[in-house]
Image (tube, rainbow, N blue to C red):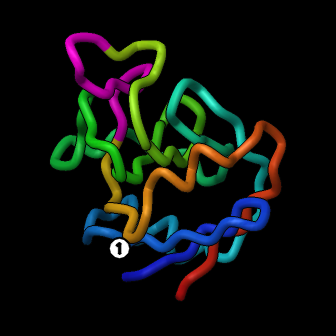
Amino acid sequence: MDIRFSIGSLQMEAKLNDSSTARLIASRLPFDAKAELWGKEVYFYIGPKVELEPAYAADVVEAGDVAYWPQGPCLCLFFGPTPSSRDGKIMPASAVTVLGRLTGEIKQLEKVKDGDSVKVERV
């Protein structure tokens, strides 16, 4: 399933995996939020709140990963190191459920500012 993130004037698409968390979030689209930054991670608060999905759980991610952080609950777009990162690994604040991958030029996320409006919708 493909989704689009519109953040300010930026648009990026992602391919979601077949996890139950990805399907649940996709079923609730579209939604609006406000972007926040944590190092080179864009995140924003969403509903619903669901538990970490063990089969897709990760405490180390890659640039371009789209993930759900159950403690937020938030969607996270990773494009580089976070304050938790060490040894060259991209690390979220705590374990996330990886939902898929961004397509396109990930470095565009460096243009995002705290408070930018976010719209998430199906493509």
Q: Percent x, y for residue 88?
A: 23, 20
Asked if residue 94 is among those painted magenta in the image, a careful observer would answer: yes
Tag count: 1
Residue 16 painted magenta: no
Q: Is residue 21 left or right of residue 4?
A: left
Query: How far across and how far down the image is residue 95, in percent?
Result: 33, 28
* The quarter of the displayed image where residue 110 is located: top right
- Identified at 37% across, 70% down, the residue is 103
Q: Quadrant of the N terminus?
A: bottom left
Q: Position of residue 46 (x, y in %)?
A: 66, 51
Place of residue 71 in the rendered image (x, y in percent of width and height, measured from the top left): 52, 29
Q: Nearer the viewer, residue 65 or 26?
A: 65
**Dot 1 surroundings within 10 Å: few (below 14), some, or many (20 or more)?**
some
Position of residue 20 relative to residue 98, above or below, is: below
Give residue 31's quadrant in the image.
Answer: bottom right
For residue 93, which quarter of the picture?
top left
Q: Is residue 117 left or right of residue 60?
A: right
Residue drawn at x 22%, y 48% as measured from the top left: 56
Q: Is residue 9 above or below residue 72?
A: below
- Picture residue at 53% right of the left edge, 88% below the top: 123
The front one of 112 and 52 is 112
In the image, what residue occupies the spot 47% across and 37% down?
A: 69
**Magenta region, mostly helix, strand or loop?**
loop
Q: Residue furthest bottom?
A: 123
| Magenta highlight range | 86-96
Between 35 and 81, the one lying in front of the other is 81
Q: Three-letter amino acid code at disc 1? A: Lys
Q: Secondary structure at mark 1?
A: strand
Q: Is residue 55 above or below residue 69?
A: below
Name the residue that disc number 1 marks.
Answer: 15
